[in-house]
Amino acid sequence: MNKGKKTQRVDKILGHLGIGSRADLKKMVKQGRVSLNGQVLKDSGAQADPYTDQIEVDGELVLYREFIYIMLHKPAGVISATEDTRDRTVIDLLPEHYKVFHPFPVGRLDKDTEGLLLITNDGQLAHDLLSPRKHVPKTYYADVRGLVGEEEAARFEQGVELDDGYVTLPAKLVVTGQAQDEEGPVSRILLTISEGKFHQVKRMFEAVGSKVLYLKRMSMGSLTLDETLPKGAFRELTEDELNSLR
C-alpha cells in the first residue's frame, strides 16, 4: 500500500507524522537525536524512502504511514465537522497525534445522532463511500413514535416522498420490538438506506406520520460499529475492516 513512493526529505517525513516542525527537527538533528539506517543524521533535509529506510528518533523506530482510518462511536452532542466555533466536533475527540494527519469525518451524522463514524484523511476512500453512484448501504437503529409495522415497511420498500418532493430509493425497514413510554407506543427498528440525503431517516419517518426519538448508525457498507467501544471512544480499523471497504 503506497509503497515504492519516491524519496522525501527526512524533516518532511517526520513533520507529516507530527514529530515536530521543520525548525524543531533541524534542532533535533543537530543534537544527534535522529538516525537514518543506523547512522546519526547530519542534515534534516537528507532524502529517505519513508517505507523502506529506517528512521529513528531518540532510539525509537519511526513507522511511517500516509493515511489513518479511525472508527469512532460518535456520542450525541458533537458535530460531524473538522472545526466549529461553537460546538465540539468529532475531531476534537481525537488526540494530537491523529490530528496532525488532518483527518475528516466520512459523511455526517446529526448532532443528536450516535453511532458509527469513519474518520480518515484518505480522500479517495471517502469519495468512494459517499458517491451517490455507489449506493453504499447504511443501517440505523432507531426508536420511533407510534406503532410501525408492515404498512410502513412496504412504503419504505417502494420509496417514500420527502417534504421537498424527493422520492427516496427503496429502503429496508425491520421492526425489532415495541415499547411504551409516558406519551404512548414506541417502535424499535432497523432501517437500511443506500443514499444520504439531509436528515434522511428522520424525514422518511415524518413522511409516514412518525417521529424519530433516538437514532444510531450501526453500519456503513461492510464496516460495522464495534459495540465494545463506549460512546466517544475510537480505534483504528483492522486490516480486514480496511480491506473490506476497498
Image (cartoon, rainbow, N blue to C red):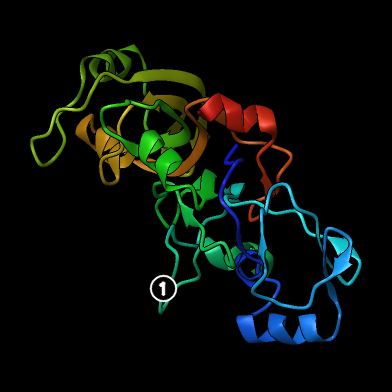
The image quadrant of residue 14 is bottom right
Choose top left, top right, bottom left or bottom right for residue 206: top left
Helix, strand or loop at label 1? It is: loop
Q: Is residue 217 left or right of residue 50?
A: left
Q: Tell me what residue is drawn at x 44 percent, y 61 percent.
A: 79
Give whichever of 92, 213 is nearer the camera.
Answer: 92
Left/right placement of residue 42 relative to residue 64 reads right
> At x 43% / y 32%, what residue is drawn?
185
**Residue farthest toward the left in the current orientation of the protein:** 165
Instruction: Identify the image quadrant of the N terminus.
Output: top right
User: In the figure, is residue 108 to the left or right of 118?
Assistant: left
Residue drawn where x is 32% and y is 20% of the image: 171
Vertically, is 112 above or below 97?
above
Q: Compare residues 208 and 179 and report the one nearer the observer.
A: 208
User: How far across and down, in percent of the image, does residue 153 sit?
Assistant: 32, 16
Let me know if residue 61 appears in the view: yes
- Residue 59 percent location from the top left of the image: 91, 67
Q: Amino acid at mark 1?
A: Asp
Q: Residue at x 68, y 66 (%)?
A: 97
Residue 29 in the image: above or below residue 111: below
In the image, is residue 174 above or below residue 9?
A: above
Q: Quadrant of residue 208?
A: top left
> Could one spot residue 183 in this view of the protein?
no
- Depth check: 178 or 107 in front? 107
Work out whether residue 231 or residue 206 is closer to the camera in this orientation and state it.
231
Identify residue for label 1.
Answer: 84
Report crowding for label 1: few under 14, some 14 to 19, many 20 or more residues within 10 A (C-alpha).
few
Q: Is residue 206 above or below residue 175?
A: below
Give the percent coordinates (x, y) of residue 214: 46, 44
